[in-house]
Image (cartoon, coloured by chain):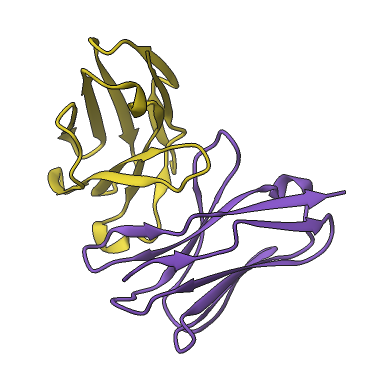
Chain colours: A purple, B yellow
Amino acid sequence: GQSLEQPSEVTAVEGAIVQINCTYQTSGFYGLSWYQQHDGGAPTFLSYNALDGLEETGRFSSFLSRSDSYGYLLLQELQMKDSASYFCARRDSNYQLIWGAGTKLIIKP
Amino acid sequence: DTEVTQTPKHLVMGMTNKKSLKCEQHMGHRAMYWYKQKAKKPPELMFVYSYEKLSINESVPSRFSPECPNSSLLNLHLHALQPEDSALYLCASSPATSASYEQYFGPGTRLTVT
């Protein structure tokens, strides 16, 4: 299988750090992408990890461990505008994106 | 220019109507995608065009008909839709299908079928 699992909802406080986890099945794995989608908006590409390790882009970082079939998105210095749904996604052998169900991030003041 | 545009933003159509959704990108991308997204669900892939040729059709009903007139444009023709087809229709592009991990999405067309 090629499914991905991520928590349905995560709650955090403004200014804090939050981690959104994603586990996947290893069959035909090429890399893990992360997308952000605000309510009523379109998905926006955040990051892609093909190799193990941490990729940092400003307040957002993404991590991959291929040996553990696991990745996460780390958001630092949370702002209210970070309230959104976050999707992990993997590319399959046909170059299609297989999406996780999404994690709704709720940020409280 | 890193923008994908879609028209119209909203569309209400009856089950006997024929309408078209339009998508345009000027990033020189050679892969373009149509997705359908229901509320609180991830995007669901419908079609993939690679170098203006249909490469993937995810068993989509024939009442949805895609068209790629040139490398910048993608259309989705709609005919005899059902109420359950009401959803957000998203267009996306990537430099190539091999770079499908990084897709740029348009704002979507919110479709309501009455």
Q: Is residue B77 left or right of residue A73?
A: left
User: Can you give x and y, in whole percent of width and height, for residue B24 in the image?
Assistant: 32, 32
Residue at figure coordinates x 34%, y 37% from the top left: B25
Residue at left offset 30%, top offset 26%: B22
Q: Quadrant of the N terminus of chain A?
A: bottom left
Closer-to-camera residue (B17/B95) = B17
Task: Give the farthest residue toward the bottom.
Answer: A67
Q: Position of residue B43 (x, y in %)?
A: 41, 46
Quadrant for residue B62, please give it: top left
Depth order, front residue of B82/B76: B82
Q: Say if B38 sits above or below B77 in the image.
A: below
Query: Residue B42: horizontal and vertical position, in percent?
Result: 45, 48
Frontmost residue, A46 versus B11? B11
In which quadrant of the rendered view does residue B98 lie? bottom left
Query: Residue A18, percent across and down?
Result: 73, 65
Which quadrant holds residue B32?
A: top left
Q: Residue furthest right?
A: A109
Residue at 70% from the left image edge and 47% from the top image edge:
A83
Seen at 40% across and 58% down, the residue is: B102
Please say if A10 is above or below A54.
Answer: above
